[in-house]
Amino acid sequence: MLLTAMLLAAASEPAAIVRVSFDRESEVAAQASGFADIASGRKVTADDPVRVASISKLVTAIAVMRLVEEGRLDLDADVSDLLGWRLRSPAFPDQLITLKLLLSHRSGLNDGVDYVLPLDARLQDVLTDTKAWDAENAPGTFFRYANINFPVIAAVMERATGERFDLLMDRLVLAPLKLDACYNWTNCREETAARAVVLYRAGAPVRDDNHGARPACAVLPARDGSCDLAQWQPGTNGAIFSPQGGLRISARGLAQIGRLLLGQGSVDGVTLLSPRSVALLEQPLWTFDGSNGDTGSDESTGMGNTGFYCSYGLAVTFLATTQKGCRDDVFGDGRRRFGHAGDAYGLRSGLWVDRERGTGVAYFATDVPADEASKRSAFTATEEALARDTKAAQR
């Protein structure tokens, strides 16, 4: 078994592949192949938790909408009022920043500064750096995908509730849906962390190599090396629990999120959102017109406008945009779908819903080469296969 695992790791195929398809009523099919942990020879299953990267943003947005329904948050209000400090673009100091702008990557923030912050950092200090801001385009006028938006969103959520972000996400989304999931392992059971899908690059572990236990420090330690979560203060550092990408959840759990959206906010007798809130999540707030945003960057070349992002809403991506320059149809069939993709530490993931057909798919693959290109879309060939072909996970 270990020899097979080593050969798999050395090959160009992903280390692990999982795909779950679903409809409004139930899971339709689940497939898994490869290894969650190459060193131990542990095979991957559809129930194993994985760091799903930016799909975390969509799940964060569901919690935001719950707080909006409770009247604790307002999508159109100045977030400075809750943060307790003034959040403004240095180049456009009169333009207020709202949750709607942060969720839709139109706030003027960009990833010119580090968004992975140590436990004792202050987000306010980080965002005084002019490199964190777009100096040319005013908030609300331009789309640029930026992870740093989500630590700000998490900080606003904490200030509105007085609750720690990871615990808040558990209360608002994960626990009601009975999902064995967490942000940054802090609120997952040790036996869940023991089943982590290890993330690899070229066969080498780069994330979540947990060795059968929850990490001793599940967040980035303070600058003195300490890892005492008792020093947490609401809204001071919204980056601690990685709201932009730190959700650990299984593909089967992601399918449950997809079914929640298909069910207009309800799934298996549990209601989290009103149909009106789901309709807001399904509303594009930005669509590429040729000049009003950056459609994504290619890490291997550093070039922008790859056509990956062409229509976006409240932490929701919309597929199959017909505008020239858009290459966002991972399925290759021209159908409108919504959801989110993930890309980090060699992992590629996706959660996509087809409202008209009432179907969807959740998938991930690990150790996908960074330079694996496709001529058809801005996605990788692995993602294209997982999106459209239920046999892809059997490779």
Image (spheres, grey):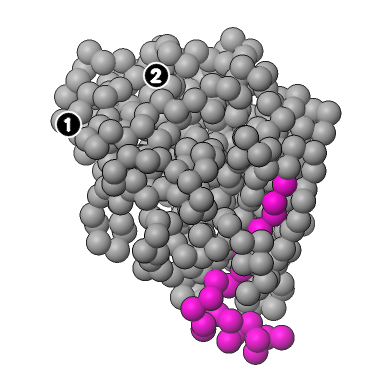
Question: Which residue sits at x=56%, y=33%?
Answer: 60
Element carrying mark 2: loop
Q: Which residue is mark 2?
A: 98
The residue closer to the viewer here, 326 or 265, is 326
Q: Position of residue 17 (x, y in %)?
A: 62, 66
Which one is nearer the viewer's eye here, 244 or 27? 27
The answer to whether residue 46 is magenta is no
Q: Is residue 318 left or right of residue 327?
A: right
Residue 59 shows in this picture? yes
Q: Which mark is residue 236?
A: none
- Give the Cα separation between the discs numbered 2 and 1: 18 Å
The image shows residue 107 at horizontal and vertical percentages of 33, 27
At a point 63% along the width and 50% down the height, the residue shown is 362
Residue placed under numbered mark 1 in the picture: 135
The type of residue carrying mark 2 is: Thr
The residue positioned 55% from the left and 63% from the top of the image is 385
Q: Residues within 10 Å of mark 1 (few under 14, many from 20)?
A: some
Magenta range: 1-22
Question: Taking 270 as reference, is 35 left or right?
Answer: left
- Seen in the picture, residue 326 relative to 105 is either above or below; the reply is below
The amino acid pointed to by label 1 is Ala
Considering only vertical position in the picture, is 118 above or below 393?
above
**Residue 67 seen by the camera:** no
Q: Is residue 5 magenta?
A: yes
Nearest to N terminus: mark 2 or mark 1? 2
For the N terminus, the image quarter is bottom right
Q: Is residue 192 left or right of residue 321?
A: right
The residue lying furthest to the right in this view is 269
Residue 182 appears at what percent x and percent y? 65, 44
* Quarter of the figure with the C terminus: bottom right
